Image: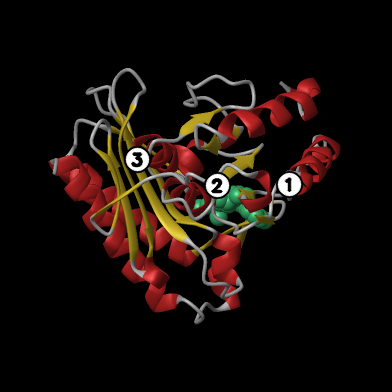
Amino acid sequence: MSKELETAIAAARKAGGIALRKFGELDLAEIHPKEYKDFVTEVDQACEQSIASAITDAFPEDSMLCEEGSAANGYSGRKWIVDPLDGTLNFIHSFPVFSISIALSDPHNDLVAGVVYQPVLDELFTAEKGQGAFLNGKRIHVSTRNNPEHLLIATGIPFKEYHYLESYVSMLKDVVHDSAGIRRAGSAAIDLAYTACGRFDAFWEYKLFPWDYSAGVLLVREAGGIVTGFDGNSDVSSHHSIVAGTPTTHPLLLEKAKRHFQEHL
Ligand code: 2AM
Ligand code: CA
């Protein structure tokens, strides 16, 4: 295992411990509005500080992009992409679905390492480019389900921008017809990790940030899946829309995304 992945795992586990100790114990005074319907807690900030210092200590020459603003501008061309707590709204509501997401991209913007850690279940998803994807050290693969009647599909429902709500709802109706069920877990990193290990058969969400999806994208790809934007482009580094799935489900979902979101692409 590379030093990079080891560092990311240790940082994710440590942040997971910080989050778990405060889970269900958060005081209202520790929750701060960031934007409309978007919150940051003192736990997000403590997790981020812990992760950011672990990464800069180990790799001072790298850059860093973190959701809550920690940053570094190294000369190496490599970039760490960090969501210290993905699923903050769940965390605030004591809904036990949240994760820590850490990814590394190389100077070509290719994702080379990724970790998603779900502390409540002590589940650690890891991947390195070309090495496969793992859950708690065991190799994982995307699902082999392909009958629409059997598919469990994850999504993120729009929560603060409404100009694409109609497109989203028309796609949702379409997916309802072509699946067994739909889940909105509230952490895109977990949606992608669960797609990588075959719990979910596919995932789509329109408005995301690199810290929400970077580690999860590598997990899905290394588990044999496909990830693109809604336009079909596999360079997701500057994307805000994500379709992830298996070699069977990704094309089905991408076709729907292109059709329903035509005016937004
Ligand atoms: P966050 O918790 O790190 O902010 C999926 O919808 C993504 O949107 C989540 O991964 C979540 O990441 C982010 N998000 C931010 N505010 C949200 C909200 N009010 N409801 C749902 N998701 C939200
Ligand atoms: Ca977050």
Please, is residue 60 above or below residue 46 in the view? above
Would you place residue 192 above or below residue 46 in this image?
above
| Ligand 1 neighbours mark 1 (CB distance < 8 Å) | no
Q: Looking at the image, which residue is at 60% across and 63% down? A: 89
Identify the element where label 2 is drawn.
Answer: loop
**Spot occupied by residue 210 in the image (x, y as percentages of width and height):** 49, 36
**Residue 184 visible at all:** yes
Residue at 54% across / 37% down in the picture? 244
The crowd level at tag 2 (other Cα within 10 Å; few <14, some 14-19, many 20+) is many
Q: How crowded is mark 3: few (under 14 residues within 10 Å), some or many (20 or more)?
A: many
- Name the residue tied to disc 3: 103
Q: Which residue is labeled 1 in the image?
A: 158
The one nearer the camera, 250 or 185, is: 250
Mark 2 residue type: Asp
Packing grade of label 1 (10 A; few <14, some 14-19, many >=20) is some
Decide which of 115, 256 is in the foreground and name it: 256
Left or right of 107, for residue 183: right
Check contact, mark 3 vs mark 1: CB within 8 A. no
Task: Tell me how far mark 3 sits from mark 2, CA to CA.
Answer: 22 Å
Proximity of marks 2 and 1: CB atoms separated by less than 8 Å: no
The amino acid type found where label 3 is placed reads Ala
Residue at the bottom extreme? 25
